[in-house]
Image (cartoon, rainbow, N blue to C red):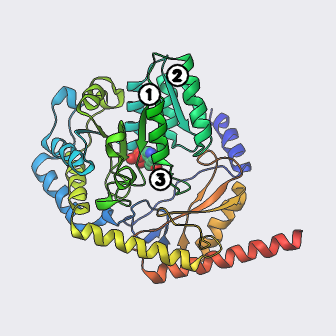
């Protein structure tokens, strides 16, 4: 029986694509304990250090005392517990939209929303580097799927024209991210908004890596560019910069009411624990406070330090756009080797391989937190420089 599975695992290992779990016996914070070794963690999306923030822990503890642990059932069955209602009001206030709906994860928010809003004869047009949850939702919907090369406005426009010509009466939905999860760059949002208006399409924007980090009070890229009202479907996660768990969608009241009726990942899934909702509400309160602004400023100064330390990755004309700092290496094997070598120097930086990124673009993905010390960042950069110099020397010998 298991020989059947083992052959497939062996094949993955052969291609340097095998994934394995590593146990961590510490919170997600800059210093972590990896199976008996202390490492400095440069892998977490907890950009502001909120996963361990005292105010959030306290909110969760209080909610456990008041509401217990599990939510009991889907909200349509057993009712909405107050912490979920408060969280959705808070998200809508923070994001400046009419209403919001929360899901157990960002993944289920994406899948439920896309499959709930699109039918067979609708058209969904997706950036090629979009997160797996968006691709999976688009596929599950059964709608006609068109993919445009990353941030390629010309191809997006030709798909829009094609959709309008062949499906004049259908819903046409453009899907993109504000900060791309494995590259850290932004989408050309203002241009995409202009284009979707011109072709009568809708726009869904996944701000998973932007909220908390970009814009005033961490409202994200749409708010920073003054485009909040132009986005039909705002999506994001409470699991990254907000340090908790869960996904959200926000927008018009009608959008949210429709999702309550159509999003199967919402309808057929038990609500998240109320303690997590209470902690996420506290995270938004934090983002709206002066302490939130200071934490974002701390992150900015650390990003500038990284850019200073790594001029080969960040020449003066290249602006840092997010806390995601990829070092593209090529083959999966090279990325795994790099992870091991950097690990031996005391730094945990994950290798990202196919299918998370396209083939032959495997990379190290460094993420910074406002909580890293300048010394930790300088130490990492020194190890990275040494590794990259060794790589260059080896290539010179080969050539
Ligand atoms: C992480 C991520 C998600 C999924 O969010 P989770 O809350 O982790 O399930 C969705 N979209 C993007 C762009 C992401 O990076």
Decide which of 33, 383 is in the foreground and name it: 383
Q: Residue 200: which disc?
A: 1
What is the x, y in percent for residue 63?
A: 15, 52
Q: Secondary structure at mark 2?
A: helix
Distance from the alpha carbon under mark 2 to that under mark 3: 28 Å
What is the x, y in percent for residue 219?
A: 32, 54
Q: Secondary structure at mark 1?
A: loop
What is the x, y in percent for residue 26?
A: 38, 67
Q: Are marks 1 and 3 in contact (CB under 8 Å)?
A: no
What is the x, y in percent for residue 305?
A: 49, 78
Report whether the residue tagged 3 is closer than 8 Å to ligand 1. yes
Q: Are marks 2 and 1 in contact (CB under 8 Å)?
A: yes
Determine which residue is flagged by label 3: 179
Q: How packed is label 3: few (under 14 Cα within 10 Å), some, or many (20 or more)? A: many
Quadrant in the picture for the C terminus: bottom right
Identify the residue at horizontal 53%, vertical 81% (top origin): 378
Identify the residue at horizontal 48%, vertical 79% (top origin): 376
Q: Residue 278: which disc?
A: none
Distance from the alpha carbon under mark 1 to that under mark 3: 24 Å
Quadrant in the picture for the N terminus: top right
Is 396 displayed left or right of 385 in the figure? right
Is 348 displayed left or right of 63 in the figure? right
Name the image quarter holding residue 310.
bottom right
Determine which residue is flagged by label 2: 164
């Amino acid at each position: 029986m298991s020989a059947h599975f083992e052959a497939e695992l062996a094949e993955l290992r052969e291609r340097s694509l095998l994934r394995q779990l590593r146990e961590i016996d510490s919170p997600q914070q800059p210093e972590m304990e990896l199976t008996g070794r202390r490492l400095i963690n440069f892998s977490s999306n907890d950009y502001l250090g909120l996963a361990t923030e005292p105010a959030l822990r306290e909110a969760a503890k209080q909610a456990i005392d008041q509401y217990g642990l599990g939510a009991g059932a889907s909200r349509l069955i057993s009712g909405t517990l107050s912490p979920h209602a408060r969280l959705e009001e808070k998200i809508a206030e923070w994001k400046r939209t009419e209403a919001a709906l929360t899901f157990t994860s960002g993944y289920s928010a994406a899948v439920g929303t896309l499959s709930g809003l699109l039918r067979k004869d609708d058209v969904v047009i997706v950036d090629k580097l979009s997160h797996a949850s968006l691709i999976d939702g688009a596929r599950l919907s059964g709608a006609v799927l068109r993919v445009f090369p990353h941030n390629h406005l010309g191809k997006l426009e030709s798909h829009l024209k094609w959709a309008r010509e062949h499906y004049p009466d259908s819903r046409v939905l453009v899907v993109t991210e504000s900060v791309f999860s494995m590259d850290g760059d932004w989408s050309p949002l203002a241009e995409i908004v202009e284009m979707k208006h011109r072709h009568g399409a809708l726009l869904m924007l996944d701000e998973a890596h932007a909220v908390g980090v970009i814009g005033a009070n961490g409202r994200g890229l749409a708010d920073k560019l003054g485009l909040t009202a132009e986005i039909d479907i705002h999506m994001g996660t409470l699991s990254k910069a907000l340090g908790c768990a869960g996904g959200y969608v926000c927008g018009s009241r009608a959008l949210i009411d429709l999702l309550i009726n159509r999003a199967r990942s919402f309808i057929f899934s038990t609500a998240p624990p109320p303690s997590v909702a209470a902690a996420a509400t506290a995270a938004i309160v934090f983002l709206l406070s002066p302490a939130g602004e200071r934490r974002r400023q701390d992150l900015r100064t650390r990003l500038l330090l990284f850019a200073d330390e790594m001029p080969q990755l960040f020449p003066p004309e290249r602006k840092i756009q997010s806390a995601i700092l990829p070092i593209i290496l090529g083959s999966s094997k090279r990325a795994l080797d790099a992870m091991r070598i950097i690990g031996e120097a005391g730094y945990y930086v994950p290798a990202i391989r196919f299918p998370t990124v396209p083939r032959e673009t495997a990379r190290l993905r460094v993420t910074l937190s406002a909580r890293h010390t300048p010394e930790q960042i300088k130490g990492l950069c020194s190890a990275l420089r040494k590794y990259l110099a060794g790589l260059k020397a080896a290539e010179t010998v080969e050539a």
